[in-house]
């Protein structure tokens, strides 16, 4: 497996594939009153584009896989936004929805999405989370049944994601453990294993490295926003007396992670998963308005343009319709 720490351009997914997924997600969410309180078109676009960039292209013909993957991503962004904004006081209120008591009634599985249960009219947020999760689990049944171990890993890392919410890491080693769970990338990787129905993979170390690379790279491109919102970021935990020095050392950390994986021997299927997540995530970021300032910082750092780098740090990082930039 040969991958560079400077990801190359990646062939973009077809616009029609993304548009049809956005339309399906938006249509689903508009059934619920809570969609009026969140920028649902923006989030559905964000999720659908990320799914299309990171999912192996041969799966783009599988509309159910692409829709369910995009739906999961949009749901996590909705939940993440509510947690970050403080509009959900108890994360347990959400985890109880994601991990209720085990269902033993087969009929409940059979009617997973198309049931007649009453809606949570007094709690529109919980209603839309419950409905989206139910829809997701209904759509992935064929993949989950064929790759149960992969699905269990998705659930495991989703539990870890909720466990670390609101935690405050105090050191770079703390942050590594925190970001591995908080970034959600382990869930993404294992979902692709599930969709590809890979059953002979057990070494998770390669996924740990890939997950941290993507999460740390996202930190580089989100630094302006994170700095304003006081969100933990790998740059803050990297050594250095200035942002430039800390940024440089954060890039070095990412490069070292690439060194750990670029000569790793893995199967062609896992290579496909890892390369699509690494290259797809990178190229997705480059095209999203929410990372425009972060991309400028990265380009200035690559050009050793310290003066404009420091000037860019003072700029606002507001992207229209992005709930994380308000």
Image (cartoon, rainbow, N blue to C red):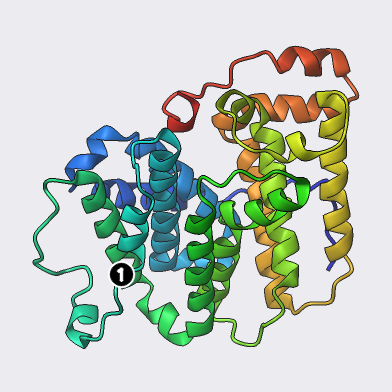
Name, please, the residue furthest toward the front.
170
Q: Tell me: residue 198, above or below residue 90.
A: below
Question: SS for tag 1?
Answer: loop
- Does 36 appear above or below 196? above
| Residue at screen point 72% across, 79% down | 203
Residue depicted at x 53% and y 49%: 50
Q: Is residue 313 something one can see in this rendering? A: yes
Q: Identify which residue, 20 or 214, lies in the foreground.
A: 214
Where is the N terminus found, in terms of image quarters?
A: bottom right
Q: Report whether 196 appears left or right of 309.
A: left
Position of residue 139 relative to residue 223, above or below, is below
Residue 49 image position (x, y, % from top left): 50, 47
* Quadrant in which the C terminus appears: top left
Tag 1: Cα neighbours inside 10 Å, few (<14), some, or many (≥20)? few
Front in this rendered view, residue 215 or 268: 215
**Image spot of residue 81 (x, y percent):** 42, 39
Label 1: which residue?
Answer: 100
Of residue 108 and residue 16, the one placed in the foreground of this image is 108
Q: Toward which corner of the image does residue 250 lie, by quadrant?
A: top right
């Amino acid at each position: 497996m040969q991958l560079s720490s400077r990801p190359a351009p990646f062939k973009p997914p077809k616009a029609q594939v993304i548009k049809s997924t956005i339309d399906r997600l938006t249509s689903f969410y508009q059934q619920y009153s809570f969609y009026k309180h969140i920028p649902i078109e923006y989030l559905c676009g964000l999720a659908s584009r990320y799914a299309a960039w990171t999912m192996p292209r041969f799966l783009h013909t599988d509309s159910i896989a692409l829709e369910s993957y995009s739906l999961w991503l949009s749901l996590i962004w909705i939940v993440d936004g509510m947690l970050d904004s403080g509009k959900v006081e108890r994360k347990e209120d959400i985890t109880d929805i994601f991990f209720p008591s085990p269902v033993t009634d087969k009929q409940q599985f059979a009617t997973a999405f198309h049931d007649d249960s009453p809606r949570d009219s007094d709690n529109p947020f919980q209603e839309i989370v419950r409905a989206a999760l139910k829809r997701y689990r209904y759509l992935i049944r064929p993949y989950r049944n064929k790759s149960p171990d992969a699905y269990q890993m998705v659930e495991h890392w989703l539990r870890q994601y909720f466990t670390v919410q609101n935690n405050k890491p105090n050191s770079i080693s703390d942050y590594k453990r925190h970001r591995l769970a908080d970034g959600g990338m382990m869930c993404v990787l294992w979902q692709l294993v599930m969709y590809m129905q890979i059953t002979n993979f057990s070494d998770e170390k390669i996924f740990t490295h890939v997950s941290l690379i993507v999460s740390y790279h996202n930190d580089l491109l989100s630094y302006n926003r994170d700095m304003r919102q006081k969100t933990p970021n790998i740059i803050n935990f990297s050594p250095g007396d200035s942002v430039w020095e800390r940024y440089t050392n954060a890039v070095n950390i990412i490069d070292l992670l690439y060194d750990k994986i670029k000569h790793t021997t893995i199967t062609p299927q896992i290579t496909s998963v890892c390369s699509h997540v690494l290259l797809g995530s990178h190229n997705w970021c480059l095209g999203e308005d929410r990372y425009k300032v972060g991309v400028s910082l990265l380009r200035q750092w690559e050009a050793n343009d310290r003066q404009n780098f420091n000037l860019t740090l003072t700029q606002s990082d507001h992207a229209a319709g992005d709930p994380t930039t308000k």
